[in-house]
Amino acid sequence: MLTAAMLNFKNTQFTISPKNCMRVYLQPCLVSFRTCIKHLSCTLISLLFFFFSGFTCKKGKQNMGCVHGKCCSRYPLSTDGDSQHEVSPCGPQSKHTLTQRSLESISVPSHNFKLEYSFLTQRGYYPDSPDKENQDSFCIKTQLQGNPNVHFFGVFDGHGQFGTQCSTFVQQRLVEILANDLTLLDDPVRAYNSAFVVVNNELHSSEIDDTMSGTTAITVLVIGDKIYVANVGDSRAVIAVKEGNKIEAQDLSYDQTPFRKDEYERVKVCGARVLSVDQVEGLKDPNIQTWGDEESQGGDPPRLWVQNGMYPGTAFTRSVGDSTAEKIGVVSEPEVSTLQLMPNHLFFVVASDGVFEFISSQAVVDMASKYADPRDACAAIAGESYKLWLEHENRTDDITIIIVHIKDFTLSGAGATDNRTTGVNFRPSVQKNGRKPSDMSTASGSDYFRSVRSDVSDLHHTVSANRSQTIIVPTLMHQRPLES
């Protein structure tokens, strides 16, 4: 009994308040007073194990991960630092590291414009788990397949006990698979679909235990004057569109959660129970299958459960990995949207849900539009996100953001056609065919990013006892000068 109780806590990722802790783990002991007394010693020992095992609190959108985790061997990190640029969350790092890259620029010669970009990634602040890894990964790779008009931007938000390994694996392999797909330029949507299927299968067969772990993926592929956005999960991409005197946010992806009616119905057909934690625990009527929007849910979103168990408890409906949740409809097929760039498209943002937890897409665009330099915009948005997390909870999520400015884009430079539109062509992806990718060495593209140790400036900050903000936010009065 003691061993079973200890394992029950050890295998749990979902962090809950003391109140919920009593609900979830003591409720079986409350069937009768006699049963409660019988198991009291077991429960007390388990609670001690709970508090000393680095159990961390998660609620709100962070509940979009799995309720349970699973122990397994650690996945060895690749030592090839030259294939692409990444800030590796699996390597040795200082606690609460802030990493930001200097401003970079790349041309798109086929349409005579350039992309100017920067990124920022901030490890989350977890007071109960000070050594918790940053589970976010990201990838920016320019001149994919050696083509100066093809560029890739992606953010991957891992979840579960081995979320770091999952996000790193997918971050590395997805761009490699795309780089080796000879049909990429002919049919980017098909190539995206195939790449996600392949990387999901590879993750399942790798040394990583993805039974209760996985990652979201939000990626943007620029091909000439079009962008293709592939989304799996609840990270997000948004583009800024100038409409008259206003700058409006246009979502390029749509969070895949049970809040969406189409996703709710899909997973129900696959056998999932869709219930909030309170409903699973019997505190609310499980027959009520209507929820408000995500913002009004108050930290108890609808989740996916097997028919006769209290797992996996995912609050997203798509991910890479999560082999247990896959059996009840959590799929890795991305939803792919396409957008024809126009002169009124100013910049796009790719970010994990650590940014969008308390900030809307429009608010992110509003903040970013105040800064001429994407480095300042990244810092401002991440700083605001960090502050809002600490105002609502005693921790923060990992925060990763990429901002890409679209410079000098004109219709004449693009050789415009008559059928251009500023609308997003949203194409849900259901394709399942994939192929075995060839070796990455066949790609001759310019790997813009290199080793993090030689090419990225790491700013190490330790969170003080009062959880002071670690991100230095630029003021509008002290922006960096415009760079030509």
Image: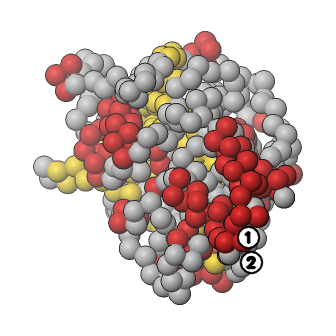
Of the two numbered discs 2 and 1 in the rendering, the one whose residue sits closer to the viewer? 1
Rendered residue at 71%/58% (across/down): 40
Badge 1 local density, few (<14 within 10 Å), some, or many (20+)? few
**Residue 27, picture quadrant:** bottom right
Disc 2 versus disc 1: distance between alpha carbons?
23 Å
Q: Which color scheme is applied? A: secondary structure
Residue 311, image x and y in percent?
70, 66
User: In terms of depth relative to the viewer, which is nearer, 481 or 338?
Assistant: 481
Residue 83, image x and y in percent?
71, 28
**Which label is found at residue 308?**
2
User: In terms of depth relative to the viewer, which is nearer, 421 or 218?
Assistant: 218
Rendered residue at 25%/44% (across/down): 366
Rendered residue at 47%/49% (across/down): 353
Q: How many marks?
A: 2
Residue 179, image x and y in percent?
69, 42
Tell me which label, 2 or 1, sits earlier in the chain: 1
Q: Give the residue pinned by disc 1.
A: 35
Q: Quadrant of the C terminus?
A: top left
**Which label is found at residue 118?**
none
